[in-house]
Image: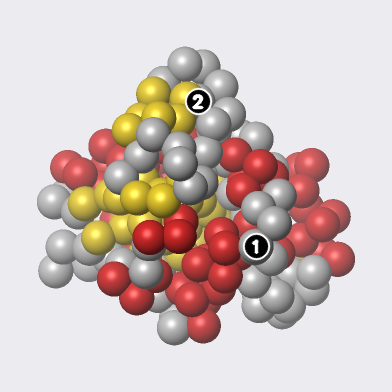
């Protein structure tokens, strides 16, 4: 079964944390939909990679997607500053419905806004671990942590393992 993955992302994402999973997913026949803030046409990564935005958050319906990908960089923090909390609510759908949810580096920050990570095992970039712990998550120091359909990873150095875990979860 080919999955349609929602990618919640905005400017200042860590380029390789989007381009690498995207390549791995597309090579297996999956599709990705870039979802960003309202009225945003193009997003630009920290290192200059540009993506055309496919849908605004206000036009996106989480139930139309099979999974969600949350790349890191500064993007997750910027998405959390959305006054309506739409990105957190969108992400919450995937945890509530036990759908595949993938977050790397700073990406797990967005999971905090779901209020659903208490007791979950995950990992992230070191600078957001305390926030995740304060939200009730159990942090493990390993390249990839799989807790049901929630797959998290630490840094770009872990991308091979992260991508393999994502692909295995979609089989």
Q: Which mark is residue 84?
A: 1
Residue 115 in picture, x, y percent from top left: 70, 75
Q: Quarter of the image containing the C terminus? A: bottom left
Is residue 84 visible in this depiction of the protein?
yes
Residue 105 falls in which quadrant of the image?
top right
Q: Residue furthest top?
A: 48
The residue shown at (46%, 64%) is 101
Helix or strand or loop: what does disc 2 sit on? loop
Q: Left or right: 61 with respect to 70?
A: left
Helix or strand or loop: what does disc 1 sit on? loop
Residue 61 falls in which quadrant of the image?
bottom left
Q: Look at discs 1 and 2 and give the one toward the viewer.
A: 1
Residue 19 in picture, x, y percent from top left: 36, 32
The image shows residue 141, relative to residue 71, as above or below, that is below
Q: Left or right: 5 with respect to 145?
A: left
Q: Left or right: 56 with respect to 81?
A: left
């Amino acid at each position: 079964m080919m999955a349609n993955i929602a990618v919640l992302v905005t400017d200042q994402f860590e380029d390789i944390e989007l381009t690498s999973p995207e390549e791995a997913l597309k090579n297996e026949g999956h599709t990705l939909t870039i979802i960003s803030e309202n009225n945003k046409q193009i997003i630009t990564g920290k290192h200059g990679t540009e993506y055309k935005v496919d849908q605004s958050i206000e036009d996106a319906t989480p139930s139309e997607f099979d999974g969600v990908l949350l790349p890191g960089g500064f993007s997750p923090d910027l998405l959390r500053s959305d006054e309506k909390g739409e990105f957190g609510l969108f992400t919450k759908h995937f945890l509530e419905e036990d759908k595949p949810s993938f977050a790397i580096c700073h990406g797990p920050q967005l999971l905090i806004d779901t209020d659903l990570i208490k007791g979950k095992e995950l990992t992230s970039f070191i600078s957001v671990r305390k926030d995740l712990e304060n939200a009730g998550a159990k942090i493990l120091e390993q390249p990839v942590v799989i807790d049901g359909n929630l797959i998290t990873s630490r840094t770009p150095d872990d991308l091979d393992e992260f991508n393999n875990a994502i692909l295995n979860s979609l089989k």
